[in-house]
Image (spheres, helix red, strand yellow):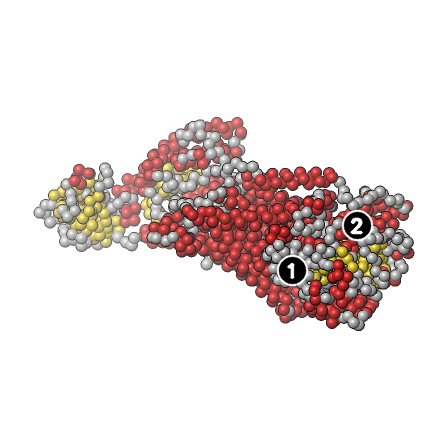
Amino acid sequence: MIGTIRRRRPSYAAIAAAAVSGLMLSLTACGGSSESSGEAAPITPAQQQLYDAAVASGGKIKLFIGTAANGETDQLIERFKQTFPKVTVEYVSGTGNEVTERLLTEKRSGLNNVDALISGGLTSYRQVADENYLSRFAPEDANLFTADKGTYIDNLAYSFGGQYNGVCYNPNNVSDEEAAALKTYNGWVDPRFKGRAAVINADGSVYRRGLSYWLYQDDQLGKPWLEKLAALNPKVYNSGNVIVPQVIAGEYDVVYNIATIYGARAYREGAPLECVTAERAPYSTFVAGLISQAPNEAGGKLFINWLFSEAGQRAVQETWSFSALRAGFNTPVVDADWWQTPKDARVVDEDLLNQRYSELVATFNSLFGAASK
Amino acid sequence: MSYIQIQDVVKDYSTFRALRGISLDVAEGEFVSLLGPSGCGKTTLLRSIAGLEEIHGGSISVQDKVLSSKGYTMPPERRNVGLIFQSYALWPHMTVFKNIAYGLKLHGWKKSAIAPRVAEVLDVVGLEGMDARYPSQLSGGQMQRVAVARSLAAAPSVLLFDEPLSNLDAKLRESMRIELRRIQKEVGTTAVYVTHDQAEAMVISDRIVLMNSGEIVQQGSAKDLYETPETAFAAKFLGFSNMMDAKVVSTDGAGGVAQFELDGVRLPAIRGRARDDVRAGDRVQLSVRPEAIRIGERSEASGGETDGVVTLPAAVTDVIYAGSICDVFMDAGGLKLRAQVTPADLERLAVGDGVSATFDSRTVWPVPAGEDPVADAESAESEAGVAA
Amino acid sequence: MASVTSYVERLRNKKDLTFAAPVYAVMLVLVLVPLGYLVYAAVQTASPGAPNSSFTWANLRQVISGDAYWQALRNSLLLGFLVSVFAVALGVSFAWILGRTDIPFRRTLSVLVSLPIFLSPFALGIAWVLLGSEKSGLINGNLRNLFGPSAGFVNVMTFPGMVFVMVLAFAPLAYLFTLGPMLNMDGSLEEASRLAGASLFTTMRKVTLPVVLPGVLSAALMVFVLAAEMFSVPGLIGPAANYRTLPFFIYQNTTASPPQWGAAATAGLALLAIMMLGMILQARATKASSRFVTVSGKGARPVRIRLGRWRWPLFLIPVIYVILGVILPACALLLTTFLKYYTPGLNPDLLTFQWWTRVAESPQFQTALRNTLIVGSATPTVAVVIAFAMSYVRNRTRVPFRQVVETVGMLPVSIPGIVFGVGILWAYAGSFLYGTIWLLLIAYCARFLPHALRVISSGMVQIDRGLEEAARVGGAGVTRTVSTITMPLLKPAVLSSWLLLLIYCARELNVAIMVYTSDSQVLPVLMWGAMQAGSYQTAAILAIIESSLILLIVGLATLVLRVNIFPRDN
């Protein structure tokens, strides 16, 4: 039993730990990841002022980020630091709902811990703004991001990146013919996908757009379609971050109602994941907003401005794989070959969405049960 | 003035009274034993002198300074007494040297004076050179000596011993008794010693205080207690005694002769020693020590007393060989007797033999008859869970 | 029973009381306040710290009338029961095989078999998700490669899979709990049975087992309580297996949108009641077990049982456990950390160091590691001091209510971690402590205090009072006696409980998941987040780092400092 050993033997624990520490130390020395491409971009005078102020306020920027893709977030932050090396960025991440709730709990308790909220869809921002926790701020060049009225709240929150909803599948387990079928919503519910599918919960802020748009815009779909989907016995998840690695690993063959940014990332890594959008691909955006009583207000503004700058938009595409929303920015997310941008993509109408939202979620939950995460 | 003055000390526990008005004076340099059965209050009294227990009445003073009284208990660390525990209580994480030096430091001894003093007391107890050892490296007897040395080091005014030899085996106990007495005499410190072993008390102390149920039954020299116990309890506690129920027929008064009629045997009255507090008509128990009884051939005499010698016809019921002293058990017409004989004598006897048991009437000592208090005391104490 | 005068006399002992009073106060704050707030939360409408909250019975109604709650409750109890039965069966067989028989490599095996205690059950769960997923698991993947497409039979993302992982995690605990009674048995009891004609196994069934039964029962109850209140593994596997337990139900309610704090608190109170019952029974069983101890110190030491032809078959049992519980998981975790993206096929092209680099450079990780180390070393220190003070009050003073001190101090054992976390959150949200790692310190102290209390109290009881009295008589006041005599003699107990608490704190998730904020993340929370994010590589790296840290510290302490982290109380 532990503690009564008397023979002299090498401490396996010590050896193992030494090996691990040695490994870690050598890795740390290795430097950055292979994906960062980077020269520092030119800094505008306004940004320089904010930079100096941010460093003077302690040099730490705190973000709440509504996606659990920490690996990609870390890469994004690396790109930011190539231009602004003297500040550190810390963040708390989770699904949009989680992060918003945590922010609200902390703010209500009087904790002023966050500089900016970066999350999907405007609904969270309306919620936060209603309790007066958003600061009035418009990023530099905000006017280049206001093409679509449904993507910003004036002076409070602006969208900087977008994504489509569709299907991601593992090409090793899905035949070409099946893949072609996935281009139509009827193809999604084909019985041959029974037991091979996962679906993203309709309650996620981004994903509710996906289902709600065509479910309630198209009378041929709606509840009967949802029932056919339920008949496939799919596992339900709250976010793509959890399910995508499982699709890549082969645990599931297809996942429905998922953002296609995952496909972009997988493509860069050479992982077996491909995407396709069906008709009328819904489109949703990622938003940034400055939080009230931010501990490092200059830092928050600095980061948000950067996201909206050209260098930032490029970083957003290359790391997070969102489509840049800056007017005049024409670089494709990855390269032109990886998939075909859908022709009739449209941003979801928030008002229409909010009318039918709770009904959709109720129907969805009754058919599929709560998410298994 | 006596060195230690204990006046009317009373101590209560929640369910009973452990000390019922104890008064005792101890002279300077005296070695006093508190003797008694489990639960009689001797350890409680000792610990009260040490300040580890409070008292609820009376007072305890040393050299005219009051240490304990009702509502006041001077903390033990200010009393300058030494206490030697049954379990030695040597601190296992300190060497012998550190164990002894501990108290010296606290009593303000200068650093340069400590080492010589430690050596001195180790010398007194016969353990020179052992100062670097740890308690785990010592034998039982050695540990006991270190405990004594530790208590002696700071020159306490009183040395208290709490059954220190109970954990040693028999042979060691015997030699240690004598050692302890030697040490005490050499150093001259007043000592109070608690024990339940009457042989030990008799060997080691100048004076014995016999206690039972929270009271002092008798105090005096070993000889006093052995030869003239005041009660049946005292008679039975110190050594073994043959007890015979009898009635006082007449008495001369203290120092003189009394006549007794034995119960249960049809014999004429026998003579024995008289006491002041035993009057004609009183019921008594006659105490005769086994070593006083001689065993002889059965004679035709039917028993009784002649010329100061009491003869009782008896039949041998058991013989026990126990080395230098052997026991013979007899039945004298219903009276159970026990005698001590030499091995040579034992050889002549066999179970069933008819013999005469004879003893001098000067060895007959009366004690008042009454209930046996010993058994009651034991059960009461064990209920309270007090280790006395 | 005490007379009035003696009670009054005890109250006059003012010095003791001035020392005991702060101890009582600390206890109240640590333990009773969060519990009180839990009750408060159950009947409030809003979130902790929110300004406009009002009284309501709605939460209670909602929880009781909802199906989900009763299902979760049933699930927790069933899970606790099954895990307990199997883990104890396994643990007892280890105790018998390793402690009493003559199988080879006993010493090595007893070390290896105990290892999972120090490693986090959550890490074990992660490893088995990687190993045992139906389509993407390492085991099935390789079985399919070897034997064809239908060869994969393992599926850990099921209820039996959850039980399996938890049994692996708890068997060592059952082993350590029953080893003592097994070894302390009087060997002549068994010898008498053999001489009477009973075979080896009959003897074990009819003599050995009944004698160690109280100890076994105590271990079973302990495992039941721990399994039923566990959050990490059922949270990991449960949803996919469609088996939701009560801790997960509580967690889900707090992370729903909008969060249902009232429901969470109500469910928490229910779980608490069950756990308390379990702990009371366990304490009774332990007391009974100590009455059953047959060795007196001078009795016969049990003789090693010769197994003969059963030697190698029985040898396999602990070996298979070590493979399933230590070796395979360690390999799976290590392998995963080097995979570009997770897949069961072992493709050399996929090997990369990038994940290690990312984690090492990530400020999240560095902060979490630092926080874990700070809280992991500060908490044991504070808890040990409090435990010492409480033991002293209990064993060496005569202040009123001192027995209660120990009972209340042991209370947190029966409070499920996640429930306690909800209570702490409610108690401290809005205070200056919220959001700091000091809140974690407070929560951890309260949660793990019972373990320190148990060890230190039993150590103090074993110190002969005479040693302290001798110091008093020798001239030392109370404080000096405590510092020069009592404390040094308690050193082994203090060290071992300090280390034990360090291990518990380093891997604690149940409370942290409720209480952490952006500033106070710790490694296990990061691990949970990584699994939630589907980043297996990161989770595996963190699991390896956490386990290595713990192993390193335990190895150092055990082999170099000779500290015995699980002292056998005999």
Q: Which residue is mark 2?
A: A319
Q: Is residue B332 above or below residue B182?
A: below
State the image coordinates of residue B32 (x, y, percent, origin top left).
Answer: 36, 39
Q: Is residue C212 above or below residue B121?
A: below
Q: Quadrant of residue A165?
A: bottom right
**Residue at the location (23% across, 49% down)?**
B243
How many other residues sit within 10 Å of disc 2, few (<14), some (14-19) or many (≥20)?
many
Q: Which residue is mark 1?
A: C240
> Which chain contains the residue that carries disc 2?
A
Residue C364 appears in the figure: yes
> Which chain contains the residue that carries disc 1?
C
Q: Is residue B359 left or right of residue B145?
A: left
Q: Nearer the viewer, residue C266 or C439?
A: C266
State the image coordinates of residue C39 (x, y, percent, origin top left).
Answer: 63, 63
- Rounded to the nearest whole Å, what is the CA distance between mark 2 and mark 1? 30 Å
SS at mark 2 in the image: helix
Residue C392 appears in the figure: no
SS at mark 1 in the image: helix
Q: Is residue A255 left or right of residue C98?
A: right
Q: Nearer the viewer, residue C486 or C102?
A: C102
**Residue at the location (50% across, 50% down)?**
C317
Q: Quadrant of the N terminus of chain B?
A: top left
